[in-house]
Image (cartoon, helix red, strand yellow):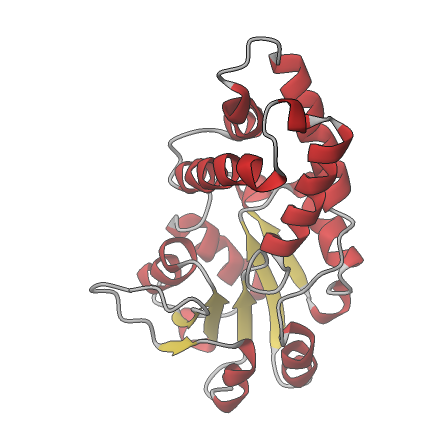
Amino acid sequence: MKYTTIFFDLDDTLWDTVNNNTESLEDIYNDYKINKYYPAFTDFYNVYSPNTNKLWAMYSKGEIDKPTLLRERFLYPFRSFSDVTVEMSSEMNADFLNRVQFKKGTVAGAIELLDYLKSKYRLHIISNGFTEIQYTKMKSAGLNPYFDKVILSDGVGVNKPHPDIFNFALKEAGVNPQDVIMIGDNLQTDIIGAMNSKIDQVWFNPNDEISGSVEPTYVVKSLLEIKAIL
């Protein structure tokens, strides 16, 4: 067996971020009567989601800090409405975080894959998600029993793709890079990050994104394809 250890990303790789977030966001839309500003939920979502994705990309690169991300993601959609204050947007954000952490949705094939891998490898999580909700998210989705260690950027002090978080994870797991493979959906944070730390990678790429000049060790469109690799 070439590998002894697997590093998994959490959000969008195992935990179904898109659907879990959308459900929670729609609850916020209804409870806070956001239809006063956006007549349909899709109108609100189409402003909120691209901006939030941009903020997360900036956060991963260290261009903004965590408080900025948390503040701006609900403030931005209301930038044109003077009656929505920073305090109101902060309340929405806190409510959203409280709701979303209890969502149970996992990516298709995630549990079947973990059942297959658990007896063969030591499994660990490496995530840029926030400490205050990642553990609850994993518990809610039934993921905790599969993993030995959960390594969060909040605790390490740097985000993926920074080499320090991968080096920290290697040390915590007590393994060398050649013993590990990283499974994740994000080309920049998971795949290039692992690659720069000399860790093999499986790029989970369900949407057929273009990798450009990046050549991951493996590319799969569905999680269950990984069973043929490992």
Quadrant of the rendered structure where residue 51 is?
Answer: top left
Asked whether 131 or 84 is in front, the reply is 84
Task: Classify residue 208 as left or right of residue 12.
Answer: left
| Residue 71, horizontal then vertical, whole percent | 56, 24
- In the image, is residue 112 above or below residue 212? below
Q: In the shown orientation, is residue 49 left or right of residue 92? A: left
User: 107 or 113: which is nearer to us?
Assistant: 107
Farthest-out residue, top: 82
Q: How many marks?
A: 0
How far across and how far down the image is residue 114, in percent? 66, 77
Q: Residue at the spot x=72%, y=57% of the render?
A: 138
Q: Position of residue 97 (x, y in %)?
A: 70, 37
Q: Is residue 45 above or below residue 4?
A: above
The residue sitting at 47% across, 40% down in the picture is 56
Residue 142, quarter of picture: bottom right
- Vertical comparison of 117 with 48: above or below: below
- Nearest to the observer: residue 36 or residue 6: 36
Depicted 66 relative to depicted 160: above or below? above
The residue most toward the front is: 39
In the rendered image, residue 44, in percent from the top left (x then y), is placed at 56, 35
Image-based side of 8 in relation to 89, left or right? left
